[in-house]
Amino acid sequence: MPAPGIPRCPTPGSRTGPLQGILFVLHTGIGWEDLPQELGFGSGMTCWRRLKRWTDAGVFDQLHQILLDRLNAANRIDWSRAAIDGSHIDAKKRGAGTGPSPVNRGKPGSKHHLICDGNGTPIYVLTSGANVPDISRAVDLLDGAPAIAGRPGRPRRRFDTLLADKGYDSEAFRHACRRRGIEPIIPKRKSTGVKGLGKLRYVVEQSFALLHQFRRLAVRWERRLDIHDSLVSLACALICWRRLINWTA
């Protein structure tokens, strides 16, 4: 049974067929022009135009926010710690948020910068060029994380601690975290690291694995950055929805 307040998936041929088409493309990675019309979702271009309209309206960002609020109301957001990291993906078409990939012989690529809670729930994702250092978007990642409601009192945005690897070793970033009331746990570059940190940070790798199971995100095909980011938000919402269903079943 779906979670309270979450609608059932629409059937092919219904008015929400374009949404089903978008979900099909997101899961399979198939090209918009290759979307089989016999599935009853409409043409690929019809789905793409609907995706553009929803992107302009911020629909999937709002959906992700609603589901984060629901998880928080169920006491399923771990505020004790957050983890951040970046992950490279190939970009088949050039556009904003692409650059020469240092891990793929300088071919065009993008990078997802992600912050998740202690359970690995994706909170916020940024997309940049593949050649952008993780540390350069770290503060943007912190400030882009939404305020999450669902519990008594004011919506909460800041986690107690932040876990990151040596790529985020910067005194300026540590000071930025502390100014926001977050205690950073970041090993020094020339140190042996923080014992046990990897066992706590694995959740961000888990979150990336869940995100990139959506094949349309494992490789970037969208030239427009806003369209790609909208699909990322939809994927984050789906991950949150699955967790909400599992925890409330």
Image: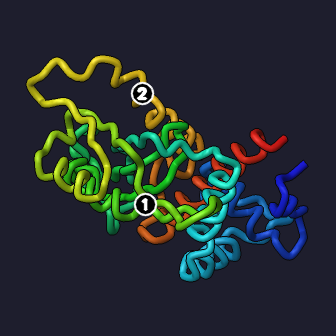
Residue 32 in the image: state x and y as whole percent. 63, 63
Residue pointed to by mark 2: 200
Please report whichever mark, 1 or 2, sits nearer to the chain's N-terminal start.
1
Q: How is the image coloured?
A: rainbow
Q: Which of 166 and 95 is in front in this view?
A: 166
Q: Is residue 70 left or right of residue 7?
A: left
Residue 115 in the image: state x and y as whole percent. 41, 48
Q: Tag 1's secondary structure?
A: loop
Q: Is residue 180 left or right of residue 75?
A: left
Tag of residue 136: none
Residue pointed to by mark 1: 145
Residue 142 in the image: state x and y as whole percent. 34, 57
Residue 111 in the image: state x and y as whole percent. 34, 50
Q: What residue type is labelled 2?
A: Leu
The residue at the point 38 percent across, 47 percent down is: 90
Residue 185 sits above or below residue 156 on the image: above
Q: Which of the 4 image quadrants contains residue 36?
A: bottom right
Q: Which of the 4 image quadrants contains residue 12?
A: bottom right
Calculate the distance from the C-alpha at mark 1 to the C-alpha at mark 2.
Answer: 20 Å
Q: Tag 2's secondary structure?
A: helix
The residue at the point 34 percent across, 42 percent down is: 162
Q: What residue type is labelled 1?
A: Ala
